Image (cartoon, coloured by chain):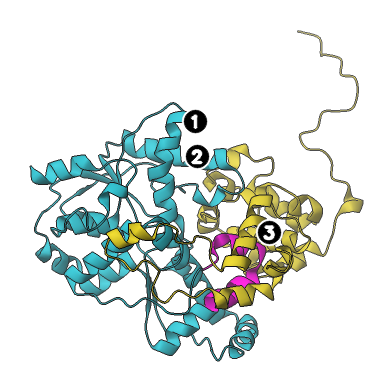
Chain colours: A yellow, B cyan
């Protein structure tokens, strides 16, 4: 029988131990008070969400782990993760959760908390600016194309004032720096 | 109509109008509205997203019209906000406080539907079939429904079978493929572009391997990913798929005998000439 290999140094662990002094025990209640966050605590970590996610293979934190991290109170790790912003919002995880946890909706809640702290990816911030400045994400530039198809060159009824006015007064306006 | 269809896909807009005309549907452009804000607005500013879409819904209520949209982004936002405001009294009061300043109120009395749902329920498969003059005659079409048309099911209330039947009504054959539920990748473009391209590629490859000759979509963002992105795939993956992608109303228009120029078929990035050749027999 082969001799057991001598192990030196600290034991190999699968996951880095969590520094419990860094946990925010109120994080779970914060999420539960947000839109569609009520079912959060029903998660029993079955990982069905992760199996349903088309991009979990390239995430460091898988969907079921993110939900567990929220329950544990790993607020800063969740809110500064790239994963919440890469979520496709395809709702496949949420659709299949046997516990009816609204996972995709909860990731939207996490992004809102991150945005409140000013943590928004650059290109999404640029979209926020577009919305505040122009009141729409896409603006008609090729009027002739529309005319060729028998459509009005400008979109009938279009008015961007309403959306600009609303968003100047909400978080989007603050993120975009007050607009122009 | 939203912002993406009129700016980027006037061919989609024209096809919707032509099909509506041929089938006796009357559309009226909504006034004083613009963009739903997309899931990006929902991500950074949930309340702002509720007010923007609550306002659009309240304007439609005031005018006494249901909303029909050709865009999955608008559909998803409007349906989700309507669902949320109907079920969450606290947010409904908060949103209505803002809307009151504009002389509006959200009550939740109108219906929001995607154009394909309106075709299915208001016109119906039998009536559509009766008006088909140039059946697409068995061509194999894979359907990309788009995430925000299908899910969350309790919010969207849309059944994929509706679109299946609409495609079959044109005389085409539905080619099923393994990744039919998968996302096109459009939503992740701002956060991670290579990932978005990979998702589009997975989707197109899955259709092609299942034997699709064409693909059909009902959303400008999905259309962008599956049609325009095929050009990019030549560079990023060195792969050529040549899978023409038609907006569903374009397919239906062709089957109704409407001229291809009236629905801007030449604007589709992957040429759909083979469909025309097929129709001319």
Q: Chain of mark 3?
A: A
Disc 3 with disc 2 on a shared chain? no
Establish if B230 lies above or below B155.
Answer: above
Disc 3 with disc 1 on a shared chain? no
Q: Residues within 10 Å of mark 1 (few under 14, many from 20)?
A: few
Disc 2 with disc 1 on a shared chain? yes
Q: Which residue, given by chain and number where applicable, does mark 1 sit on? A: B236
Q: Which residue, given by chain and number where applicable, does mark 3 sit on? A: A111
- Is residue B38 visible in the rendered image? The answer is yes
Tell me if B146 is positioned left or right of A21 in this view. Answer: left
Percent x, y of residue A109: 67, 63
Q: Which residue, given by chain and number where applicable, does mark 2 sit on? A: B197
Residue at mark 2 to residue at mark 1: CA–CA distance: 8 Å
Q: Is residue B44 magenta?
A: yes
The range drawn in magenta is B36-54
- Foreground of the two, B7 or B87: B7
- C-beta proximity under 8 Å, tags 3 and 1: no
Establish if B202 lies above or below A158.
Answer: above
Q: Chain of mark 1?
A: B
Q: Chain of mark 2?
A: B
**Mark 2 element type:** helix
Percent x, y of residue B53: 53, 75
- Chief SS of the magenta region: helix
- Is residue A105 visible in the rendered image? The answer is no
Residue B29 quadrant: bottom left
**Residue at x 21%, y 41% (from the top left corner):** B273
Residue B123 quadrant: bottom left
Q: Tag count in the figure?
A: 3
**Mark 3 element type:** helix
Percent x, y of residue A118: 77, 59
Percent x, y of residue B64: 38, 88
């Amino acid at each position: 029988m082969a001799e057991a290999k001598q192990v030196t140094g600290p034991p190999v662990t699968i996951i880095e131990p969590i520094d419990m002094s860094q946990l925010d025990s109120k994080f779970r209640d914060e999420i539960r008070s947000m839109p569609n966050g009520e079912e959060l605590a029903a998660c029993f970590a079955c990982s069905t969400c992760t199996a349903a996610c088309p991009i979990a293979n390239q995430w460091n934190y898988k969907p079921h782990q993110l939900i567990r991290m929220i329950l544990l109170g790993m607020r800063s790790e969740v809110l500064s993760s790239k994963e919440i912003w890469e979520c496709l919002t395809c709702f496949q995880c949420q659709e299949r959760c046997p516990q009816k946890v609204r996972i995709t909706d909860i990731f939207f809640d996490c992004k809102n908390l991150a945005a409140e702290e000013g943590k928004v990816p650059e290109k999404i911030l640029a979209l926020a600016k577009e919305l505040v400045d122009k009141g729409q994400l896409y603006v008609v530039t090729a009027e002739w194309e529309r005319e060729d198809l028998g459509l009005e060159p400008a979109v009938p009824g279009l008015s961007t004032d309403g959306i600009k006015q609303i968003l100047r007064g909400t978080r989007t306006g603050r993120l975009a720096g007050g607009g122009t | 109509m939203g912002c993406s269809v009129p700016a980027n896909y006037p061919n989609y807009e024209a096809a919707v109008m032509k099909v509506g005309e041929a089938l006796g549907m009357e559309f009226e452009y909504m006034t004083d509205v613009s963009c739903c804000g997309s899931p990006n607005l929902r991500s950074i500013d949930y309340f702002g997203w509720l007010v923007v879409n609550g306002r659009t819904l309240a304007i439609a209520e005031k005018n006494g019209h249901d909303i029909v949209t050709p865009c999955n982004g608008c559909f998803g936002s409007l349906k989700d906000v309507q669902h949320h405001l109907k079920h969450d009294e606290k947010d409904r009061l908060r949103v209505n406080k803002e809307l009151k300043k504009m002389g509006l109120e959200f009550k939740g009395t109108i219906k929001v539907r995607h154009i394909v749902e309106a075709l299915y329920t208001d016109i119906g498969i039998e009536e559509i079939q009766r008006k088909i003059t140039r059946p697409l005659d068995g061509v194999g079409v894979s359907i990309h429904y788009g995430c925000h048309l299908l899910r969350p099911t309790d919010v969207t209330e849309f059944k994929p079978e509706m679109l299946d039947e609409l495609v079959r009504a044109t005389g085409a054959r539905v080619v099923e493929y393994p990744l039919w539920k998968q996302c096109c990748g459009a939503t992740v473009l701002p956060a991670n572009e290579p990932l978005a391209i990979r998702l589009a590629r997975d989707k197109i490859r899955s259709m092609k391997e299942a034997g699709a000759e064409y693909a059909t979509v009902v959303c400008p963002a999905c259309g962008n990913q599956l049609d325009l992105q095929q050009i990019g795939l030549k560079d990023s993956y060195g792969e050529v798929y040549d899978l023409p992608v038609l907006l569903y109303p374009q397919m239906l228009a062709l089957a109704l005998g409407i001229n291809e120029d009236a629905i801007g078929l030449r604007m589709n990035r992957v040429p759909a000439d083979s469909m025309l050749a097929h129709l001319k027999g």
